[in-house]
Amino acid sequence: MVQIVISSTGAGGLAEWVLMELQGEIEARYSTGLAGNLLGDLHYTTEGIPVLIVGHHILYGKIIHLEKPFAVLVKHAPGEQDCDELGHETGTRYLVTALIKNKILFKTRPKPIITNVPKKV
Amino acid sequence: MRTREEVDATLQIAKLNADELLPTVHCLGFGPGASGADAGDFCLLELEPALCQQLEAGHSLVIRGDKDEQAVLCSKDKTYDLKIADTSNMLLFIPGCKTPDQLKMEETHCNIIHTEIFGFSNNYWELRRCRPKLKKLKKFLMENTYEGPDSQKEEDSTRSKYTTEDLLDQIQASEEEIMTQLQVLNACEIGGYWRILDFDYEMKLLNHLTQLVDSESWSFSKVPLNICLQELGPLEPEEMIEHCLKCYGKKYVDEGEVYFELSADKICRATAQMLLQNAVKFNLAEFQEVWQQSVPEGMITRLDQLKGLALVDRHSRPEVIFLLKADDLPEGNQERFNSLFSLREKWTEEDIAPYIQDLCGEKQTIGALLTKYSRSSMQNGIKVYNSRRPIS
């Protein structure tokens, strides 16, 4: 049988991230993939409503405090660290890298931005 | 990197009024290593608040399972079924992103935060609390029961023995659930290995104790440990005497001395098992007489002490009783009901309850299980349950 450990360094070592939930898919404009590319600008109104500008769209969303938080687990394959404190050879492990207690949900239809003349900066 | 001027320009084009927005903008971009969770390097695990607290306290969780088993996730005291839940939405994981409340609480407001998206996913791991899968535990420990230190079995080093670590490696349950079950099984840690006592050996130890109680005219609720060890030490190892006291009684201290309060229910139950295991069926009336005579004087036998151990057939003439142990039955719900209905076509709730009690999850009651897995009807004014489908 396999035992895969999910270890945590405790609150001191755990960052708090945010989840953003979007409907549909995000495609990169060019075929080089998403990595390294900008997504968009995230603003909040003074009332706390998230506003996301992505490409030619504006999306309005809401902040949801998660009843069931998430943990982000990052896999460590065997070989990265040879033995644990007991001297056992460890197989695959996961490290809890962050906790997510809030999510920004965008589920309304995006509003298109109509640009006549792009403003030059 | 995007500048504040560019951000403001975009706001203008989008016809958004900067006055209605908080001063801080997050410029979101995909980090250079950002990838999808499908690559398998990271994933999202949904937690109930108690589990989240345990991770924050630095505790670990463990996934356990064989290749052909459904994976479970264990905390130190609970077991959960682990499943992958798909969502049609895209989930982005964003480190360093602040919520409006967090921004408002800050003293200085920077006006631009360059935020890198770590990764994205359209699924996550979902947990549902489940019963620990403990059937294997008894099976392993029965491979090599303990018959006392002088038994030849103890000299055979090829016989299987399990340490706590071995059990954690093999059983899909949390450590605490395994420890609790070991106690239920009256298992004993001998030489670092967990052992179940051979039933006859366990009865031998128990008989030594009850005979000593009788000859010393002690009350069953005040059995002194030190005298037991003194008198019985020449016959059996002290650890086994004390183990037997712990299994059949409750320990307490009175004026600095250790005593045990023996449980009449447990002793009567064990005595019944000893009588019933040697026969297929027992005439109920005869059994009750022999049983009462076999238990220590002063203890009263009652049929309800035998729930989950023996079953009475009140429809046969004469009425009979036979051994039926709940923990010998299959672990899965449907298989359990199938085997019960093969044994007997129709059950009353009172008779079947002890044999399905352990199937009840956190929110499932006996009633709910019966509704799901059986069909009810009335027989002689009493509600009975039978199988939903024909049992072959």
Image (tube, coloured by chain):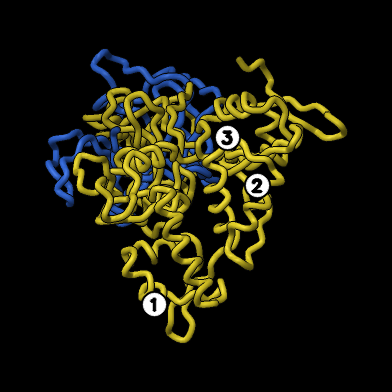
Evaluate whether label 2 is on the same chain as label 1.
yes
Q: Is residue B131 left or right of residue B226?
A: right
**Which image quadrant is residue B375 in?**
top right
Res B280 label: 3
Foreground pick, B345 / B377:
B345
What residue is pinned by disc 2?
A: B287
Q: Amino acid at mark 3?
A: Val
Q: Please tell me in which quadrant of the rendered image residue B337 appears.
A: top right
Q: Residue at x 57, y 30 (%)?
A: B336
Q: Is residue B54 above or below residue A89?
A: below
> Relative to A111, is A11 above or below?
below
Position in image of residue A4 (x %, y %): 29, 37
Q: Residues within 10 Å of mark 2 (few under 14, many from 20)?
A: some
Secondary element under disc 3, as helix, strand or loop, is: loop
Q: Which chain is blue?
A: A
Please name the residue shown 47% across and 86% down the image: B255
- Residue, x 57% and y 34% (percent of image)? B280
Q: Earlier in the sequence, mark 2 or mark 3?
A: 3
Q: CA distance from mark 3 to mark 1?
A: 40 Å
- Per the image, label 2 sits on a secondary structure element best described as helix
Q: Identity of the amino acid at label 1?
A: Asn
Quadrant of the drawing holding the C terminus of chain B: top right
Q: Secondary structure at mark 1?
A: helix
Q: Earlier in the sequence, mark 2 or mark 1?
A: 1
Report the residue marked by disc 1: B226
